[in-house]
Amino acid sequence: MVATFSAPFAPAEALLPAMRAQGYAVLLPDAVVALCGEPPGALDALKGSWDDLQPDEYLLDGGHYRKRRHACFVVDGGRIERAPHRAHWQSQDYNALHGGLRRWFEPIRDDVVASPAWSRLLLGLSAQCSQLRDAHPWYVEAHQFRIDTSDGIGRPTPEGAHRDGVDFVAVLVVDRVGIRGGETRVFESHGPNGQRFTLDQPWSLLLLDDARVIHESTPIQPLQPVGEGGHRDTLVLTWRAGAFQGDD
């Protein structure tokens, strides 16, 4: 038996106080859709696109367990502009494994970006970030991830506990199928405190102040024998003031 710890969920109205007090907040799916003005179940319209992600060819640990798509946006108030497709870049200060590489991933599909659910999610969460830190515009990167157990083990964060080099990070769990593990861990950047929990409800949210906390997710393993399949789908959104990483 592997112990699992319940997430410290907060109601929608407690997101901003939690972010200011501890640098992170965890919301149930109902709270996420309330913040974004979505009807219940609206985000499920996006789930099928995770079946069409493409292999990540940049994994330097030799694994083949990750698929993804990537897109960039400029969000200014109530306006979203999709930026021309670009490489994802982080410095080695923030990603010891893949830092310094310009990684070109397949773009998020146009029909996903055109979905009303996508726009409301992006605008709703951007509005929360703007209440925490005023920035006009926000430079937002979006990453669709599928971590699978085709290698027997899948690593959501092969770089280990890290910061992303941005202002805010949102991790939304989209689905968990036939796996165990994938525990979320959040630590103070400059302090002794930390918390561990498992996000297992589709569209539950972890929002992070990237300057104040470090985060990671533990490896996943299949519930069934290797070859039977299993995966963890997530959507990761990042907000950065001033420019995309690599442009400044």
Image (tube, rainbow, N blue to C red):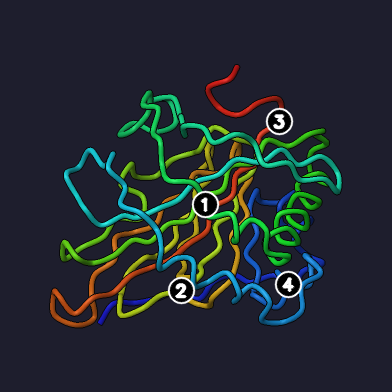
Q: Are marks 1 and 4 in contact (CB under 8 Å)?
A: no
The mark that comes first in sequence, 2 or 4, is 4
Q: Residue 30 — which label?
A: none
Q: Are marks 2 and 4 in contact (CB under 8 Å)?
A: no
The mark that comes first in sequence, 2 or 3, is 2
Residue 120 in the image: x percent, y percent?
A: 76, 61
The three-letter code of the residue at mark 2 reads: Asp
For the residues marked 2 and 3, what is the alpha-carbon distance in whole angstroms? 30 Å
Residue 98 in the image: x percent, y percent?
A: 33, 33
In the drawing, does residue 224 fall left or right of residue 129?
A: left
Q: Which residue is mark 1?
A: 108
Secondary element under disc 2, as helix, strand or loop, is strand
**Few, some or many residues within 10 Å of mark 1 (<14, 14–19, 20+):** many
The mark that comes first in sequence, 1 or 3, is 1
The three-letter code of the residue at mark 1 reads: Ile
Pick the front one: 217 or 88: 88
For the residues marked 1 and 3, what is the alpha-carbon distance in whole angstroms? 22 Å
